[in-house]
């Protein structure tokens, strides 16, 4: 039986888009010279099942949230390097260590949060997430949880918030 322990993806010419619903191994992604878009986690209106032409053997799990069914995004460590160009990173969920490096260009990072509703008693249960590090340019930034640094180029971090107010 074959297995994958790590995977490297190199994006070259053109404006590329890459989606992550989950990962089976450690991944390193290298953007090219153009504007790249990276989406980690995806929201579905309903459960992923045969009704929607998804195999029952598909290993991607989802969690019911107040907005729909949210995929895990990643279960194994992922590093995404944007490369040159104005890159866009949209993070809905990460269950892994996720390193996002904008590198050169004016990059935008959107990090979203959702509330899971999975308890049989009707209690709200908060999603478990992995640590995340964001780097917009060449400057180093290290943190235990979320970390962002704009580096030499324009850097924009957006956090739309969640359904309920902060207390």
Image: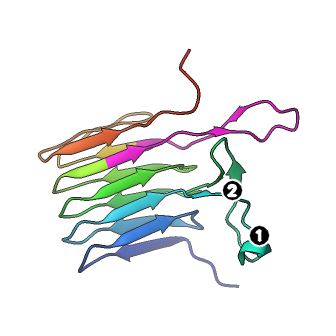
Q: Residue at x 25, y 39 (%)?
A: 149
Q: Is residue 30 above or below residue 137?
A: below
Q: Is residue 167 above or below residue 85?
A: above
Residue 83's quadrant in the figure? bottom left
Viewer-nearest residue: 38 or 43: 43
Q: How many labels, in total?
A: 2
Q: Position of residue 79 (x, y in %)?
A: 40, 58
Viewer-nearest residue: 126 or 23: 126
* Helix, strand or loop for the magenta stretch, by majority: loop
Is 55 within the magenta? Answer: no
How many neighbours does mark 1 have within 10 angstroms: few (below 14), some (14-19), or many (20 or more)?
few
Can residue 43 be seen at all in this image of the molecule? yes
Q: Quadrant of the C terminus?
A: top right
Q: Residue at x 50, y 70 (%)?
A: 6
Which residue position holds label 2? 62
Viewer-nearest residue: 36 or 134: 36
Is 115 within the magenta? Answer: yes
* Residue at the left extreme of this rendering: 152
Residue 163's quadrant in the figure? top right
As helix, strand or loop, the secondary structure at mark 2 comes to strand
What's the magenta region?
109-132
Mark 2 and mark 1 lie on one chain; the one further toward the N terminus is: 1
How many neighbours does mark 2 have within 10 angstroms: few (below 14), some (14-19), or many (20 or more)?
many
Viewer-nearest residue: 165 or 6: 165
As helix, strand or loop, the secondary structure at mark 1 comes to loop
Which residue position holds label 1? 49
Q: Residue at x 42, y 69 (%)?
A: 18
Q: Position of residue 86 (x, y in %)?
A: 21, 59
Tag on residue 112?
A: none
Q: Position of residue 151 (x, y in %)?
A: 17, 43
Can residue 56 be seen at all in this image of the molecule? no
């Amino acid at each position: 039986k074959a297995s994958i322990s790590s995977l490297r993806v190199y994006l070259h010419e053109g404006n590329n888009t890459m989606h992550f619903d989950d990962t089976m191994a450690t991944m390193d992604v290298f953007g090219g010279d153009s504007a790249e878009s990276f989406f980690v986690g995806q929201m579905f209106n309903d459960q992923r099942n045969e009704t929607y032409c998804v195999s029952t053997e598909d290993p991607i799990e989802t969690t019911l949230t107040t907005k729909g069914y949210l995929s895990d995004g990643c279960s194994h460590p992922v590093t995404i390097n944007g490369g040159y160009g104005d890159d866009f990173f949209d993070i809905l969920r990460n269950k892994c260590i996720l390193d996002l490096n904008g590198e050169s260009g004016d990059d935008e990072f959107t990090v979203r949060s959702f509330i899971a509703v999975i308890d049989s008693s009707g209690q709200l249960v908060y999603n478990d997430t992995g640590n995340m590090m964001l780097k917009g340019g060449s400057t180093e930034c290290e943190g235990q949880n979320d970390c962002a640094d704009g580096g030499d180029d324009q850097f924009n971090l957006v956090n739309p918030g969640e359904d309920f107010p902060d207390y």
